[in-house]
Amino acid sequence: MLVEYADGVVDAVLVARRSVPYGVLVRLAALLLDSEPLGDHPLPALAAPEAPEAPETQDAQDAQDRNTAPWGLGDPRTPDHITAGTVPLPDRPAWAGEETLVAAAALTLARYQGGPEARIAVYDRAFRAGGPAVRSVRVDADGTVADLLAAGTGTPLPGAAAATVGVVLGDAASGTSYTPLPGSGLALLLHLERQPDGTCTARLHHDPRTVAPLTAEWFGRSILHLAERLRTLPGTTPTARLGLLDHAAAEAVARLGGFRPAAAGPGPDRRTSPDTIDGRIAELARRRPDTVAVTDDETSLTYRLLDDRAERVATGLRSLGVSGARVGVCLEQDTTLVATLLGVLKAGCAYVPMDIRYPEERLRYTATDAGVPIVIGDPARFPRIEGVTVVSPKELLDAPEPTDVQEPTGTGEPGAETAAYVIYTSGSTGRPKGVVVPHRNVLALVDATSADLGLGPDDVWTFFHSSAFDFSVWEIWGCLLTGGRLVVVPHWAARDPDEFHELLARRRVTVLSQTPSAFSQLIEADIRSAPTAPLALRLVVFGGEPLNTAMLERWFARHSPAECRLVNMYGITETTVHVTAQEVTPHQVLERSRSVGRALPGWWVSVRDEHGHVLPPGPAGEIYVGGAGVADGYLGRPELTAARFVDDPVTGERVYRSGDRGRLRPDGRLDHLGRLDNQVKVRGHRIELDEIKSVLVSDPGVADAAVVFREGEAGDPARARIDAYAVLRDGGSMEEVWRTARRLLPSHMLPAALTEVPGIPLTINGKPDFSRLPAPSPFPAQTPTAAPAPVPRPDTDTDRDGAAAAPEAKGDLGAEILAVWSGLLGVDVEPDGNFFELGGNSLLVVRMLSDLRQRGLPKVTPREFYGNSTARAFVDLVLGRAEETP
């Protein structure tokens, strides 16, 4: 293209794909103009950045795929031969000089990309050849406005340095204008033009492949807002006080995330009466008394029988004078557990669920910290605690009606604001913390989801997860509050995907709640299932951990989304199980979507920077959650409650700082991007790595420790693991450290490996350098410690109950089994090796047994394997089974 100016000067402009090397373009231009090559003359447009190294993380991959602007949310499918898009910006913004505009653009970019260095391409007013000057501006977290303005006037970087954002200062009186061309390498270009009357106009050009139009508009508005603030604020003002948005814009983003002011009308259907979980279920029992409410392998209870039995539990509690107190519940999962939980609520109490297979010290700590006067459980199995009475459900059911009114332990009449339960989660200080959730939150959750998900009396749900895991709150009360039938999944069926699949088909389950880790195993079982055992599922709800949509390809190959709906729900214990919902379709699978959807009615989300300022759609930050699900706080932890449950100046509401990293999309959907802190999710369990470290260093023989989370290959949840490293003092032993860990930590928090090291390597800044830690080594052989109960603990990922001596593994079969174990565990397995001590877990057990079945070996159930977890014992078991098979 030839451009002729008024003075007769002619420019030749060559437009090409960004990937074409500059040297090729120069030679091509020379041939077209029949002239000598331009040699080393500078490129008028900004050079494209060099190809980055292979990305190490998903965010890095996003950055590479989107021209180092993962916040842009552009559409890479947009043809790359179009001109840049233009978005509208506010009319007549205030004029800002180059110093101010560059500083505002740098601060905006730094907040968007989450790093201190921002490169801004600055075009001069005459748009002369030679291209823009690229300024590198460092935005210090503790800097001032004066510091930032000074940094924006620094010496331009040499050569054709790369940048993703540019600014142009123009003057309408000069009659010049600027339009960016494809291939400039810029994601965004803000053009500020002074008008003859002294005002100015703003245009924002963007590459739609990199930056979506709405994201570009928010970016441009942020620059203009900050430019005005920088122009008027004192130079001593800390930049930390500057948000990207003014109050009105921040509230608009909160509305985008689901916020609705109280004056705007009601959120979800809260209903007026009754206002407690037990009150609603009692109402259902009156309307549908003979409908089956809950069933296990031995017992079925109708709604009337469930309500009657729960009332007898409540009567038993009142006879003990504990009405209104917190009550511990530590029972096997069956119909009795469900009736007991409901009975605790009927007594006006809050239940504190404890997993019966947790270590004794964990149970002792939870009961003591929660201050429960009563634990409903097995007196022979629950640890003795001074001041705590352990009663069995039968004792409560048989208790007579109290003849006199006892003074209740708690205060106030039960209602919507009354605590319904206290669930303990992992704590960074080494102490689990109890989250207090009232009745109104649970009712709001069910009201917010029942219509969209079509929940009703025709549904059959599973009670799959531990009552100490808040997913069970959704399973139990989501089913019973909508009149459905709850099927309690037996302990071993929950750990055997084939048996679980058979249960789903036999019981005609329609609503299934699963962590992605568990569902990945169910997909394999579904593929293996016989055509005569079809599933009746119409809804699968994912929760508890991030969903890798790629795992669903094989599910959709067998099940139409029109018949079985898949919904990914992001949530937190502190915000009542679920916060957002995203329907997952084959389209999301193809896109490898990371969206967790929009906030539920009555809930709302926003994303904030490190200073608590609301971020516009695009940049990543901390997810804040507000609305109907925000819990009362942490039990007995006022300082921690004040730090995490905060008053929001934007909305005037109380919000929860999740510690999760995410970004808001222009359409109001939320992307979940992991954690900001040292918390991880392993097979659905929320774990603070600092709690594990705290337990390790509590051993007197440990001088220092480090705990590392390692993701599985390609996001494989079965291979995700926690590895621990310990520095021993004189006289310390790894065997004793392991005994300490097992005594204090539940099975899902036990490290897959515990490795002794002479010291924890440090970075130059004095922080642990995990990259320099050695490869993990297996646990040393040891005598297993006694379990807290006289029954096996098959659910533990690190069960060390070795089998009796077995013959040496011999022949091809033994070698094949050892080879399969070695491949899964990544170590050379010897005949005496224990699967769990070598880093195995419950998911790898299922995978290993499935692999052996596919090789034609006899079937071994997970229950059988847990009692034969050494290679020697397992080979002997399989050999014996093979001899029995005709």
Image (cartoon, grey):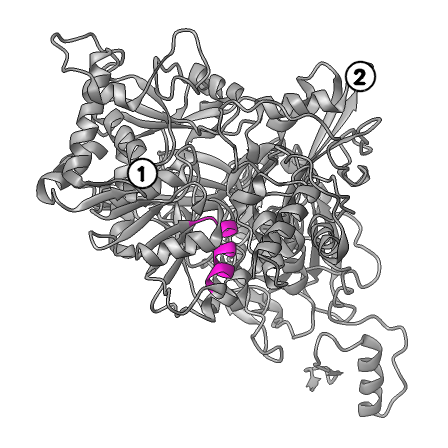
Which sits in the foreground, 373 or 299?
Answer: 299
Magenta region, main secondary structure: helix
Q: Looking at the image, how many numbered discs can be counted on the residues?
A: 2
Residue picked out by circle 2: 729
Numbered disc in front, either 2 or 1: 2
Circle 1 SS class: loop
The residue stretch that appears in magenta: 514-526
| Residue at the outermost left position | 287
Image coordinates of residue 737 in percent, x first then y, are 70, 22
Q: Amino acid at mark 1?
A: Ala
Image coordinates of residue 706 in percent, x first then y, are 72, 30
Residue picked out by circle 1: 628
**Residue 621 to residue 27: above or below:** above
Relative side of 717 to 513, left or right: right
Which sits in the foreground, 787 or 804?
Answer: 804
Q: Point out the image quarter for the C terminus.
A: bottom right
User: Which residue is at a point 58% across and 50% down the rendered structure image?
Assistant: 717
Which sits in the foreground, 356 or 243?
Answer: 356
Is 519 covered by the magenta stretch? yes
Image coordinates of residue 279 in percent, x first then y, are 17, 33
